[in-house]
Amino acid sequence: MNFITKACSLLLFCSAWAGLNAQEIIDTSVSENTSQEEEQPLTSGTTFKVDGVAAVVGEYVILESDIQQSIESLKQQKVEGQDLSTCSVMDKLMEDKLYAHHAVIDSVMINEEQIRSYTQQQIDYFINQLGSEEKVLKFYRKEKMSDLKKELLELNRNQELAKAMQQNIVEEIEVTPEEIRSYYKELEEDGLPQFGVELEISKIQIIPEVPQEEKQKVIDQLNGYRNDILENGSSFATKAVLWSEDESTRGDGGLIRDVDRKSQFVKEFRDVAFSLQEGEVSKPFETEFGYHIIKVEKIRGQKIDLRHILRIPKVTSAAEAAAKDKIEKIRKRIEDGEITFAEAAKEFSDEKETASDGGIMINPTTQDRMFELKNLPPELYPKVQNLKEGEVSIAFNNPTRTGKTRYEIYTVSDRIEEHEADFAIDYVKIKNFALQAKRIKAIEKWQDEKIAETYIKLNGDYRNCEYSSNWVKQ
């Protein structure tokens, strides 16, 4: 199972490396002997050399500051067991540069609009966290916001290029049944791995019904705001500050910048936003978060700036009590044998994704029905960890991300105790392991070939590191 560890060192999309700091396209004005010994402090107290050139990979340069900033970033992420030595981080940075360099050569396509949108989201997040553009510029030691945006754009573009290049290398790789059997035989020779307790989990969900009068109340409120804005010239932004229940935008008058059709908003919100003209205010409409009105502030090509006001209908205590009573009665009918859990899920559950399959949940990571107990989400683990097969849990309130009440009951429809890997029982996992191993070999082969044909220059002590790849071409 050594390949699992190696996979994280080879595959770019290991999450620990997602926050690496900016790197630059090499400039012919940068000399390999350039070095500034002046040290500048990070806000965390870390110091590093700012301009020494550590290495060149193809058309890319890696600076001393890139390495130290990357180490600092990983420390802040508190990645357990991650090697944060200078040599290890340098190894990974050079891999990223190699992928990006050949992605450009091979004309690998990336979504520039998506990268710009993501970069703006990053900047908006920084401003929201630190309080102002001035504080963001001070924190990142930039004179202008355009300088920070340019650096983030280059970083995000390079990371997308590298990721796209890796995906191109492995996207057509598949494993045959014979390869899976051969891989399993290799595991047998090396010692089969142990798999922890696995559960097949089913659930029934009951959502309290929002009374129609509560829905109408917020619709009337939003219509009142809209009429005051259109007829009396009242400020949309002021009303958002006073009345919107979206805490993330309320302080800025409900403003959301750079929205495009791929932005991370629910479909209903995007559909209404892109149906409006500049300056137009929508009628109230519903999403899973509540009821909204939108005003389009500016249209810039495929992007818009907008303001919105959110109002959330209140679920009455009577509605919550009725929902809890309903799920308790369903639970009793199952325990009394009047109806099976699967039948009850199909008939009563408000979660349509699982109801049609008798309440069975799908593991989003593996797309399989089985969940490894130790890897269950923390909110689910205590609810099912001690359930015996066929036993029904008590009713739990599992609030939505917007805080709305949802009552749920669970059952374990299948339980596999801790065991040594078995070809029949664990076929899906073994297949995935075999596929991953084959992809890693393909990436290693690609790296060896491209390192041999790419201009690579390491400076100073970096030539003495022990790397996973032959960067020094010895």
Image (spheres, rainbow, N blue to C red):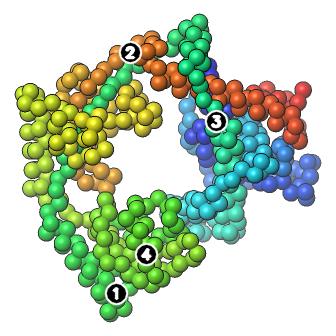
The three-letter amino acid code for the residue at tag 3 is Glu
Residue 425 in the image, given as x and y percentages of width and height: 41, 17
Residues under labels 3 and 2: Cα distance?
Answer: 34 Å
Kindly state the secondary structure of the residue where label 1 is placed: helix
Residues under labels 3 and 1: Cα distance?
Answer: 56 Å
Q: Quadrant of residue 90?
A: top right
Of 359 and 290, which appears nearest the observer? 359
The three-letter amino acid code for the residue at tag 4 is Ser
For marks 3 and 4, give the one nearer the viewer: 3
Mark 1 surroundings within 10 Å by alpha-carbon count, few (fewer than 14), some (14 through 19), many (20 or more): some
Q: Residue at x 19, y 68 (%)?
A: 215
Residue 307 in the image, given as x and y percentages of width and height: 42, 75
Residues under labels 3 and 4: Cα distance?
Answer: 40 Å
**Mark 1 or mark 2, which is nearer the start of the sequence?**
1
The residue carrying mark 3 is 172
The residue carrying mark 2 is 418
- Apparent side of residue 97 relative to residue 121 in the rendered image (left or right): right
Q: Residue at x 51, y 61 (%)?
A: 262
Of 461 and 348, which appears nearest the observer? 348
Residue 292 in the image, given as x and y percentages of width and height: 33, 71
The residue carrying mark 1 is 229
The residue carrying mark 4 is 275
The three-letter amino acid code for the residue at tag 1 is Ile
Residues under labels 1 and 4: Cα distance?
Answer: 19 Å
Mark 3 surroundings within 10 Å by alpha-carbon count, few (fewer than 14), some (14 through 19), many (20 or more): few
**Mark 2 or mark 3, which is nearer the start of the sequence?**
3
Kindly state the secondary structure of the residue where label 4 is placed: loop
The three-letter amino acid code for the residue at tag 2 is Glu
For marks 3 and 2, give the one nearer the viewer: 3
**Mark 4 or mark 3, which is nearer the start of the sequence?**
3
